[in-house]
Amino acid sequence: MPTADGDDQPVRRIAGVLLVDGAGRVLMQHRDVHALVSPNEWGMPGGGIEPGEEPEQAARRELLEETGLRPDGPLALFWQGRFASTTHPGRFNEWYVYCGPTRADQRDVVLGEGQAMVFTAPEDIPALALSYSAAYFLPLFLASPNYRRLCASTAPGAR
C-alpha cells in the first residue's frame, strides 16, 4: 500500500532512479546484508534527500554515488507521493521516483553501494527478492508509457 496514516511528517524523503538501457533492462541494486532497510533485497538506486536538496538533484547524486552513471538525457518524475515506511509502522516516507535513459551497459557500472548493481531484463525481475518499495514501483513502471518511451529512445538506432 503506497500510503500510511499517522504522523503527518515523513520519516524520510527518498529519491529513486529507474534507469533503462538500450535493451529495455532496468538497473537494479542488490542491497547487502548490512543495509538498514531491505537487506539482501533488490531495489532501485537511490536514497535520502539531504536538507536543502531538490529531489531530482538527490536522484542524480545517488545514481552517480551508487553506480558511477549519469542518465543520458533528462530524468522524468515517474511517481511522487507518500509510501508506507517499513522501519516506522504507521508512518510514511515521501518518495520521488525518476526514470531516464542510458547508453551505458554493465561494463560501465561502478558498484558504489550494495552487493551488486545489474541491468535486469523485465522478465527476470519477478524472480528477485524485491524490497517493499521495488515490489510496488517496478510493476507500475514496467506497465507504463514512460517505460515504453524509454525503451524506444534507448533502442539501438534510436535518435
Image (cartoon, helix red, strand yellow):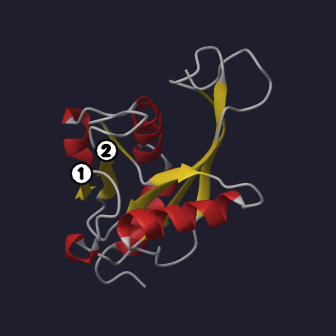
> Residue type at mark 2?
Arg
77 left or right, relative to 155: right
- Residue drawn at 27 percent across, 47 percent down: 122
* Structural crowding at the residue carrying mark 2, measured as other residues with C-alpha within 10 Å and reported as few (<14), some (14–19) or many (≥20): many
151 left or right, relative to 74: left
State the separation of the CA atoms marked 1 and 2: 6 Å
Relative image position of residue 9 (x, y in whole percent): 78, 30
Using the image as rendered, state which of residue 13 and residue 121 is in the foreground.
13
Residue 115: numbered disc:
1
Q: How many marks?
A: 2
Confirm or deny contact between disc 1 and disc 2 (CB under 8 A): yes
- Residue drawn at 46 percent across, 78 percent down: 72
98 left or right, relative to 105: right
> Residue type at mark 1?
Gln
Relative image position of residue 86 (x, y in whole percent): 50, 24
- Residue drawn at 28 percent across, 43 percent down: 32
Residue furthest front in the image:
34
**Which residue position is annotated with label 2?**
31
Residue 91: numbered disc:
none
Q: Quadrant of the N terminus?
A: top right
Relative height, residue 126 to residue 157 (above, below): above
Relative image position of residue 112 (x, y in whole percent): 34, 64
User: Circle 2 sits in a helix, a strand or a loop, which is it?
Assistant: loop
Q: Quadrant of the C terminus?
A: bottom left
User: Circle 1 sits in a helix, a strand or a loop, which is it?
Assistant: loop
* Structural crowding at the residue carrying mark 1, measured as other residues with C-alpha within 10 Å and reported as few (<14), some (14–19) or many (≥20): some
126 left or right, relative to 69: left
Instruction: Identify the mark nearer the N-term, 1 or 2.
Output: 2
